[in-house]
Amino acid sequence: MSESKDLIYAGKAKDVYETEKQNEVIVTFRDDITAGDGEKKDNLKGKGHCNSLISSKLFEVLEENNVKTQYIQLIETGSMLSKKLEMIPLEVIARNIATGSLLKRFPFEENQKLDPPIIQMDYKNDEYHDPMLNDEITIALGIATQEELDEIRNITLKINKILSEFLKEKGILLVDFKLEFGKDEEGNIVLGDEISPDTCRYWDIETLETLDKDSFRQGQDNVMDIYDQVCSMIVDEKDIERWEIQ
């Protein structure tokens, strides 16, 4: 097991640390939760634990279906050993149902099914408040080439199909989600960051009840209960037992 060293990056809810191996890092999930560009903040005991379990499980599902991710293994609850990536400053959003900010910007009907899904790319930059991009602006900024953008879209569509089917079996509707990608030491485009209720919209497939960070945005007082519920729906006890003995 790699031992953590110096802090490389501190995000809104995760920290990334060096290890003794140059091509590996430890991603630590904190209990912090934010919304509205970081304007709304709180700390929910156990959230980092839940998100690390959920992300590890979903990364493993993707790896089993030949999607390259930075995930190596869960070394303890809250901490993932991961491949070091040069992150691409894009937030790639896949939308299966029209809701959230999409309704504020465009005249979609609420809960309108989007078939094919919409793939949206935003510039990951707090100073500019993560504006939406088109290909021409992305290329002009030197963020990615057209070939890389096409590859990112294709990978995102594949991820959407895999996770939608997997989560449907768990009783969860994948409404939309945000992904981040980076390049490994060979220059391959690899999925990074996390896949959790912080970065996805999950709805109960029967009741359409919110099972994600929207509960925090809406000011509900049972946010941690919801995260615990999602974790128990996605992650089996046998997975936790397997991670504990790795």
Image (cartoon, grey):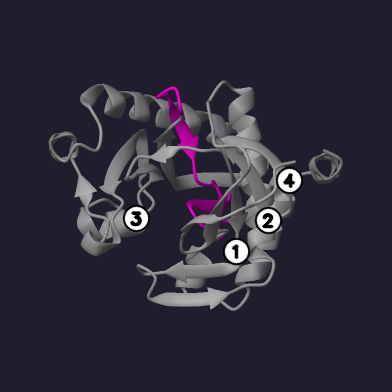
Point out which mark residue 78 bears: 2
Extent of the magenta region: 185-209
Q: Amino acid at mark 4?
A: Ile
Q: Secondary structure at mark 2?
A: loop
Amino acid bearing label 2? Gly
**Gap between marks 3 and 1, in whole Å?**
33 Å
**In the image, is residue 190 part of the stretch drawn in magenta?**
yes
Mark identifier at residue 75 = 4
Q: Secondary structure at mark 3?
A: loop
Q: Amino acid at mark 3?
A: Glu
| Sequence-first tag of 4 and 1 | 1
Placement of the C terminus among the 4 image quadrants? top right
Looking at the image, which residue is at 47% across and 76% down?
Answer: 41
- Nearer to me, 20 or 212: 20
Q: Give the label, 3 or 4, closer to the camera.
A: 4
- Cβ–Cβ under 8 Å for marks 3 and 1: no
Judged left or right of residue 182, residue 136 is: left
Disc 3 from disc 2: Cα separation: 35 Å
